[in-house]
Image (spheres, rainbow, N blue to C red):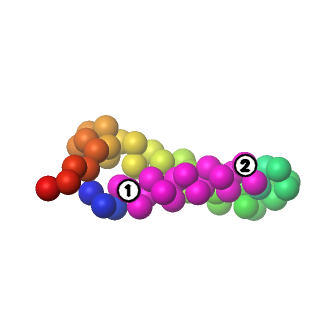
Amino acid sequence: MGLMIIFSLIVIFAAIGVIRSLRSKNLLGFVFAAGTFLVLGWFTFMTIWKHGFPTAH
């Protein structure tokens, strides 16, 4: 489940990238950041929803 933590960090950085690319009017940056945010964000959300947040063993 460490992969979900890494994907969550990537989703947070992608959200920041969406905001920065909109601010600077960078269309290609927006497309890649939004795609990353949507795809990995959905994957991360559904994995945490179905399997729960990772716990320490």
Amino acid type at image mark 2: Ile
Residue in the picture at 85% in, 55% down: 24
Badge 2: residue crowd in 10 Å (few <14, some 14–19, many ≥20)? some
Amino acid type at image mark 1: Ile
Q: Residue furthest right?
A: 25
Using the image, determine if residue 17 lies above or below residue 46: below
According to the image, label 1 marks what residue? 5
Q: Dividing the picture into quarters, in which one does residue 30 lie?
A: bottom right
Residue in the picture at 40% in, 42% down: 45
According to the image, label 2 marks what residue? 19
Does dot 2 land on a helix, a strand or a loop? helix
Does dot 1 land on a helix, a strand or a loop? helix
Q: Nearer the viewer, residue 9 or 49?
A: 9
Residue in the picture at 35% in, 42% down: 46
Compared across the picture, whether 7 is left or right of 23 comes to left
From this viewpoint, is residue 52 visible? yes
Q: Which residues are magenta?
A: 4-20
* Magenta-drawn stretch, dominant element (helix, strand or loop): helix
Q: Dividing the picture into quarters, in which one does residue 21 lie?
A: bottom right
Residue in the picture at 65% in, 52% down: 16
Residue 52, position as x, y percentages in the image: 25, 41
